[in-house]
Image (cartoon, rainbow, N blue to C red):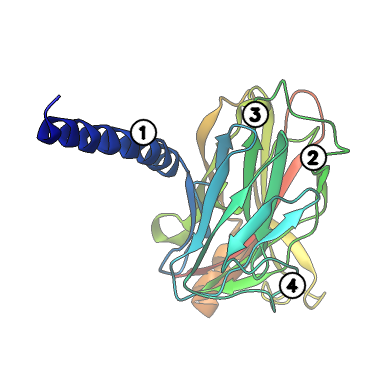
């Protein structure tokens, strides 16, 4: 074989080998899900992780990032993956930051739950590694969601609630619940993203206000000012409306604003109930 032809064959072989090495690496990078922190705007702003839940194979990785100028951090509940980069991982508001990103690798199958170190359980995310059938018992996967810390947003407050077993209660993140004042602030309208595990169950929404605001004795003690119940829930986004009581409407008209606490209870047909609590302010 002529020398020039042999050189050409060697060059082509080298290029083919490089392609074999590089292409799988690119394919792996493209298949890595990204979970990002986001912040809403306005009185009834929402904060959360987008998407709030992802599913990967055992040994897979995800990218977790906070591209915003609002401080967020990551606290793993129970089992934790191996993370690198600039992700602030720990406990409490002191473990947080802005404009960070990193990669977490999950060696074992299971459900991994995390929430923001600043905004508590109202900003919860989850990573399912493998399929539900291959997920391990509570000895390897997180078994509870601890109480989250309260956080103030622009005109509203999001508050964590009591511990709820993951294994027996539907997993709810703060971003699953949306609330806003209805027309002429005579009601509160909202929606809840009902997970498949709670389909067919019941939704209860209670609105509470301070007794002092309603010109009643009791100071800061809360009293009911609205309630709605929905049964036989479908999976997916379920809308609801809670009308305000006459006392609440009078207080809103008098003060031009009314601070409310919304307590949401989602009860599946079998298993424990999941709870979310949110504070909001109506303005007339």
Give the number of the mark in front: 1 or 2: 1
Give the number of the mark in front: 4 or 1: 1
Disc 2 versus disc 4: distance between alpha carbons? 21 Å
Disc 3 versus disc 2: distance between alpha carbons? 12 Å
Question: Between 244 and 246, which is closer to the camera in this rendering?
Answer: 244
Height in image: 231 above or below 257? above
In the displayed structure, does residue 196 sit left or right of residue 144?
Answer: left
- Using a 10 Å C-alpha cutoff, classify the residue at mark 2 as few (fewer than 14 neighbours), some (14 to 19) or many (20 or more): many
Secondary structure beneath dot 1 equals helix
Height in image: 22 above or below 184? above
Height in image: 267 above or below 215? above
In the displayed structure, does residue 245 sit left or right of residue 147?
Answer: left
Badge 3 is on which residue?
A: 130
Question: Between 233 and 187, which is closer to the camera in this rendering?
Answer: 233
Secondary structure beneath dot 3 equals loop
User: Between disc 1 and disc 2, whose residue precedes?
Assistant: 1
User: Between disc 1 and disc 3, whose residue precedes?
Assistant: 1
Badge 4 is on which residue?
A: 92
Give the number of the mark in front: 3 or 4: 3
Secondary structure beneath dot 2 equals loop
Kindly identify the residue that appears in the image at 58 percent across and 39 percent down: 60
Badge 1 is on which residue?
A: 20
Q: Mark 4–mark 1 contact, CB under 8 Å?
A: no
- Using a 10 Å C-alpha cutoff, classify the residue at mark 3 as few (fewer than 14 neighbours), some (14 to 19) or many (20 or more): some
Badge 2 is on which residue?
A: 141
């Amino acid at each position: 074989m002529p020398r020039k032809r042999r050189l050409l064959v060697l060059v082509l072989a080298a290029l083919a080998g490089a392609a074999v090495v590089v292409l799988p690496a690119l394919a792996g990078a493209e298949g890595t899900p990204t979970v990002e922190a986001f912040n809403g705007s306005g009185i009834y702003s929402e904060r959360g992780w987008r998407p709030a839940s992802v599913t990967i194979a055992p040994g897979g990785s995800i990218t977790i990032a906070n591209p915003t100028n609002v401080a967020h951090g990551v606290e793993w509940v129970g089992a934790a993956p191996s993370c690198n980069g600039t992700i602030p991982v720990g406990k409490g508001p002191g473990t947080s930051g802005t404009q960070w990103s990193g990669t977490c690798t999950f060696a074992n199958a299971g459900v991994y739950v995390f929430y923001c170190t600043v905004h508590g359980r109202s900003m919860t995310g989850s990573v399912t590694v493998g399929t539900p059938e291959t997920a391990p018992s509570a000895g390897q996967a997180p078994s509870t969601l601890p109480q989250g810390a309260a956080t103030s947003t622009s005109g509203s407050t999001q508050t964590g609630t009591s511990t709820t077993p993951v294994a027996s209660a539907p997993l709810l993140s703060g971003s699953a619940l949306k609330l806003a004042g209805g027309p002429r602030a005579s009601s509160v309208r909202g929606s809840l993203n009902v997970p498949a595990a709670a389909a067919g169950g019941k939704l209860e929404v209670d609105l509470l206000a301070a007794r002092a605001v309603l010109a009643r004795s009791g100071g800061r003690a809360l009293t009911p000012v609205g309630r709605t119940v929905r049964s036989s829930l479908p999976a997916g986004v379920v809308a609801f409306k809670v009308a305000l009581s006459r006392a609440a409407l009078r207080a809103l008209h008098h003060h031009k604003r009314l601070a409310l606490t919304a307590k949401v209870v989602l009860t599946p047909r079998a298993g424990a109930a999941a709870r979310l609590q949110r504070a909001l302010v109506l303005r007339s």
